[in-house]
Amino acid sequence: MREYLFQVVFYLSAFLTIIGALAVVLQKNPVRAVLSLVFSFFMVSIIWMMSNAEFLALVLVLVYVGAVMTLFLFVVMMLNIDIETEQKFPKIYLGVSFIFLAFFLGLLWYTMPRDLIGHAVQTVDNLGSVIGGEHVSNTTALGNVLYTDYMPLIEITALLLLVAIIASITLVHRGPRNIKRQNIKKQIMVRKSDRLKVISLSNKSEKRA
């Protein structure tokens, strides 16, 4: 019964993922297309969770759905959606799109190894990782590999990201404009000639006379 329920949930999630992906391409409204993509991400995360890849499933939901897709949604909602929806494209675009789709699918099928699907289908018992004689979760196994064998590369990547963040903030930062503030250095370095100017009033009165 458990195995039957497992297969039902898997095939249902896969079917809904394909439906969501088709809706992303076929929807004329950009907001609905983004929401369909979010729905597809949720279905894919269910499939990954069933494959004991819980880390990838959580990252997909938290990073892509929670951050990237939300950002895309806000950007798309600022567009002029009514004009974009009313645009009509020639029907020849649809035929050319299907030709390119068939070409890329055929290329993918030709380059994909024949035994890839056979090796990918594994039982749940064989999906666990073994570390130190104990079965651990996917997240634990991935963390042990990343923070032991690849620790220097992670540190270098984090440093590069930090430098990129600081550089981007520095490039786009603009100081406050039209704000009057005290310039302490300018006040200290001031000279007497800059503050006091002697004007001879007697010479001016003689010229006027």
Image (cartoon, rainbow, N blue to C red):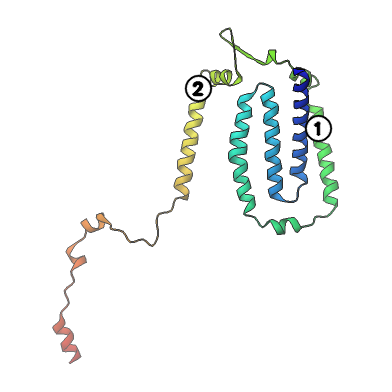
Residue 101 image position (x, y, % from top left): 81, 39
Amino acid under disc 2: Met
Q: x, y (%) of residue 185?
A: 25, 54
Residue 21 as seen in the image, left or right of residue 155: right
Which residue is situated farthest in the bottom direction here?
A: 209
- Up-down: is 110 above or below 208? above
Q: In this view, does 121 lie above or below 17?
A: above
Picture disc at residue 151: 2
Residue at image position (20%, 90%) is 208
Give the residue at x 62% y 37%.
64
The Cα–Cα distance between marks 2 and 1, rounded to whole angstroms, is 37 Å
Q: Mark 1 points at which residue?
A: 107
Q: Which numbered disc, 2 or 1, marks the residue that appears first in the sequence?
A: 1
Can you give x and y, in whole percent of width and height, for residue 86 in the image? Answer: 76, 58
Question: Can you tell which of label 2 and label 1 is closer to the viewer?
Answer: 2
Q: Does 8 appear above or below 96? A: above
The image quarter containing residue 141 is top right
SS state under label 1: helix
Q: Where is residue 74 in the image (x, y as percent from the top left)?
A: 60, 49
List the single residue furthest toward the front. 1
- Name the foreground residue: 102 vs 63: 63
Height in image: 201 above or below 59?
Answer: below
Residue sitting farthest toward the left: 202
Label 2: element kind: helix
Name the quadrant of the N terminus.
top right
Within the image, what quadrant is residue 5 found in?
top right
* Amino acid under disc 1: Leu
Q: Look at 84% across and 43% down and name the residue there.
A: 98
Q: What is the residue that sits farthest to the top in this orientation?
A: 133
What residue is rendered at 51% in x and 30% in y? 157
